[in-house]
Image (cartoon, coloured by chain):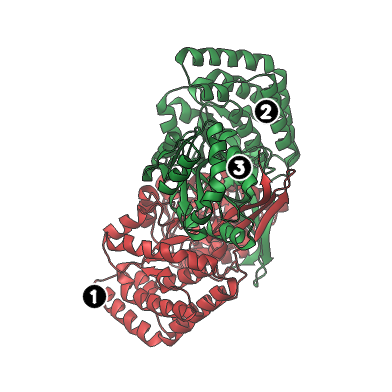
Chain colours: A red, B green
Amino acid sequence: MAKALAQAKLARDAAPSLASAGAELRSEAIRRAAAEVRASRATIIDANVEDMAEGQLKGLPAPLLDRLLLDEARIVGIVDAMEEVARQEDPLGRVLGGRTLPNGLRLEQVSVPLGVVAIIYEARPNVTADSIALCLRSGNACVLRGGSAARRSCAAIAAACRRGIAKAGLPEDAIQLVASDDHADAVELMGATGVIDVLIPRGGASLIKTCVEQSKVPVIETGTGNCHIYLEKSADPEMAVKVCVNAKCQRPGVCNAAESLLVDDVAAEALLPKVLVALAEGGVELVGDAHARTIAQEVGVAMGKATDADWGTEYLDLKMSVKCVAGLEEAIAHINRYGTRHSEAILTSSYAAAERFLEGVDAAAVYVNASTRFTDGGVFGLGAEIGISTQKLHARGPMGASTLTTTKYLLRGEGQVR
Amino acid sequence: MAKALAQAKLARDAAPSLASAGAELRSEAIRRAAAEVRASRATIIDANVEDMAEGQLKGLPAPLLDRLLLDEARIVGIVDAMEEVARQEDPLGRVLGGRTLPNGLRLEQVSVPLGVVAIIYEARPNVTADSIALCLRSGNACVLRGGSAARRSCAAIAAACRRGIAKAGLPEDAIQLVASDDHADAVELMGATGVIDVLIPRGGASLIKTCVEQSKVPVIETGTGNCHIYLEKSADPEMAVKVCVNAKCQRPGVCNAAESLLVDDVAAEALLPKVLVALAEGGVELVGDAHARTIAQEVGVAMGKATDADWGTEYLDLKMSVKCVAGLEEAIAHINRYGTRHSEAILTSSYAAAERFLEGVDAAAVYVNASTRFTDGGVFGLGAEIGISTQKLHARGPMGASTLTTTKYLLRGEGQVR
C-alpha cells in the first residue's frame, strides 16, 4: 500500500477516538497544540528559512514567497487563531431538531463529525495549523497534503501539533501530514472512498479543478473569485472611489479581491472619472467596453479593449475590467452569468436597489456599500477557515468548524414496528 | 442542443421566478398542482393502465409492477402528501445566524433555494409528484427523468402539476419532465454543470452508482441500505421476534428493510431459536455463520453458509444473513465495516449498551428497540421525501424540502473597507 493511503487509514483508525472525545478535551488538545507551536517557533522558523531559501533559488514569484514566509509575528497569528478556535462553541452534539412520533418513537437529529477530512493545499504553512485546529474542534481526524515549497515549514508545524494532542491524551495519528511531493499521493487521496469522508482543496484554480474533476471522494469546491463591484446610479461618488480602490488594490492576489467593475450607463460620466483615476494611480491596468473607454480617454487614463474572456477572468493581479450596464437587472444578470458565486457588491443609496441586489445575485456573500474583501472566516467570526466554499451543497462561503460536521438521526423506542 | 439539456435550460430560466416567489404563493402552487392531480385522476389512471399493460407484457417482476401501480387510493395518497408539503413551514428566508461585525457591517446568513434540482428515478410514479411538491416548497425548478416503465403515468402527473402552477401564476417551465427513454438524456443531465445545481438519483443500486461515478453535477447519493438488527445479550426475547420479523418481512424490497441479524454469542442460544423459527415461517431464506447454523439445526430451521460477500449484500428480498458476535464493540465494528450507513438497530435492555450503540454506529439513522423500517420522510414528519441520503455531505437520512436549500451571506454596510 502506498504511503498516502496508509496514512489516511491511520487517520481513519484514530477518528473514533476524536469523535467520542468531549468538547473540553478537544479544546484542550487545540490549546496544547497551539502551545507546542509557540514553544517550537524557533524550529518552525528555521524550517521556513530553508523553504524560503529553496524558493528563492527556484525563482518562485514574490506573492508566493510572501505567502510562504513565516516570522515571529505570523506564528503569533497562527497560535492566536488556534486559541480562538479552542474557545469557540462546540459544533458537535447539537440537537438540531426532534419530535416524538405518533407511535412513541423519540426522534432527534444531532450533529456528529464527518470522520476524516483531507486538505490539499499549496504554499501557505498556516493552513496546516488552521486545518488541524478546525478538525479537532469538529472531532475529525485530518490528512494534510501541503505544497512542496512549504514542506519543511508544514512538517514542523504538524509535528508540534501532534505532540500537543498526544499531551492532551488523544491519538497523534489523528493528524497526518503527507510529506511526499509526488502527484501520485494526491491521486491516492482523491481515490480513498470509504477512508476519507471529504476532500477540501485550497489553492489555485488548477488544483481545485483537478480535485473537482478527478476525486471520487466528495469534494468541497473552494476559492476562485471573479468578484464584482457594481456602481448603481445612486452610488455615493466618494464611497465608490474608496471601495473600488480597496477591493482591487489592498491585496489583489486573493480570492475576495474585485476583478470587474460595473457601472450604470446613466451615471458613468458622473461616477467613473474619479474611480478610474484612483485605480490608475493604484497601478491598476484597466480594460473596458466602448463607453468606459470613452470616459477613460476623457480623463487621460489608459484603458484597453475588454474581450468577452475578460468578463470571466479572475486576474488575481492589479488588473480590472470595466463595463457599463443599462441598470440593476443587467448588472445582476451579468454577475450571475460571469461571476464565480464568491463575493459581489453593490454601491447604492437606493433601498430598493440594495434589497433587489441582495436577493437577485447568486453568490456566497453579497454586499451593500462595502468592499468584497471581508469574505473571510476570521472576519466573519469563525476564528479560522478551512476554505471559502463557492459551491452550493453542504457549505457556502467561509467554512468554519461547523461545516466539518454531518448529522445523525437517533431513535429511541420500546419495540415499535411498522 | 439535445432535448434534455434544452429542458434543463428552460428550468434554469424559470428558477429565479420561483426563488423570488413568496412562501404563500409557493404553497398555493403546490395546492393547485395537487388539485389538478386530483381532478385528472381518471386520465392518470388511464395512463397507468397502459404502463401496467406494457409492463406485464414485458414480464416486469411483481414488486416492480406493484411500485408502478396507481389506483384511486394511491392517487389520494399522492395528493395528501402534496398538501402536507404545502402546509409545511417554509424553508426559505430563514435567518440561520448573524452578527454585527466590529467594523459595523451587519452580517446575516439566510437560506435560499439551490436553483435547479434534477431527479433521476425509476418505476414509482409518485416520485414525480413528491419531487415537484418539495421543489416548489423550497423555491427550486426541477428536471425529472422517470423510468420508461412509468413514462405515461409520470407524464400525466407532471402535466397536471404544470397546469396547477400556471394557475397559481408561476412559470410552468419550472417543472420539466424529460420524456425520452434514451440513456443519452441521463448523460446530458449528469454533464449539465452550471445549469443543474444538484442531481438526486432515486432507485436501484446500479442507477445510483452510475450517477455517483459519472456525474459532473454534484450528486446526493441515496438509497442502498444494508441494514442490521443487533440483538444485544439483554434484548427482550419477544421484542426480538417481533422487530426482526417486521424489519425483514413487512416490505423486504425497500431500503430500510433489515438484511442482516447480529446476536451476542453468549445469548444466541436464548434469543435466536424463536427468531429463526419466526423468520423461517415468514418465508425468509437464512444464511449464517457456524454458531448460528448450529442453533438453526437444533430448532430444525434451514440455514445456508454465509460467505463474506453475504455480510455486505443488500438482498432486497426475503433473505437474511445471521452472525454471532463477541459483544457490543464487535457488533458496532461489523456494522461500520459492512453497513451502508443507512439504518441500524440495537435491541437491548441496557442503558449503557443503547447509548454506546447510538454513539458508535456511523449511519443516517440509529435505532434502539425499534424496527429499521421507520426511516422515511413521511414517518419522520417531513411530509414527503426526495430520497434518503446515505452520504455525509449536505444531507443525511430522509430528505425533505429544507435539504433542497443552500445559504447566502448578506452584508449591509456604509462604505466599509479593509
Rounded to the nearest angstrom, the CA distance separating label 2 from label 3 is 33 Å
Q: Are marks 1 and 3 on the same chain?
A: no
Work out which quarter of the rendered image holds the C terminus of chain A and state it. Answer: top right
User: Quarter of the image holding residue B133?
Assistant: top right
Using a 10 Å C-alpha cutoff, classify the residue at mark 1 as few (fewer than 14 neighbours), some (14 to 19) or many (20 or more). Answer: few
B176 relative to A220, above or below: above
Tally of numbered discs = 3
At x 34%, y 75%, the residue is A155
Secondary structure type for disc 1: helix
Using a 10 Å C-alpha cutoff, classify the residue at mark 2 as few (fewer than 14 neighbours), some (14 to 19) or many (20 or more). Answer: many
Q: Are marks 1 and 3 in contact (CB under 8 Å)?
A: no
Q: Which residue is mark 1?
A: A57
In this rendering, which labeled residue sits more in front, label 1 or label 3? 3
User: Quarter of the image holding residue B372?
Assistant: top right
Q: Which residue is mark 3?
A: B241
Work out which quarter of the rendered image holds the N terminus of chain A and state it. Answer: bottom left
Q: Are marks 2 and 1 on the same chain?
A: no
Left or right relative to A251: residue B41: right
Q: Which residue is mark 2?
A: B78
Q: Please state the horizontal and vertical placement of residue A63, each as a whole percent of the image.
A: 37, 70
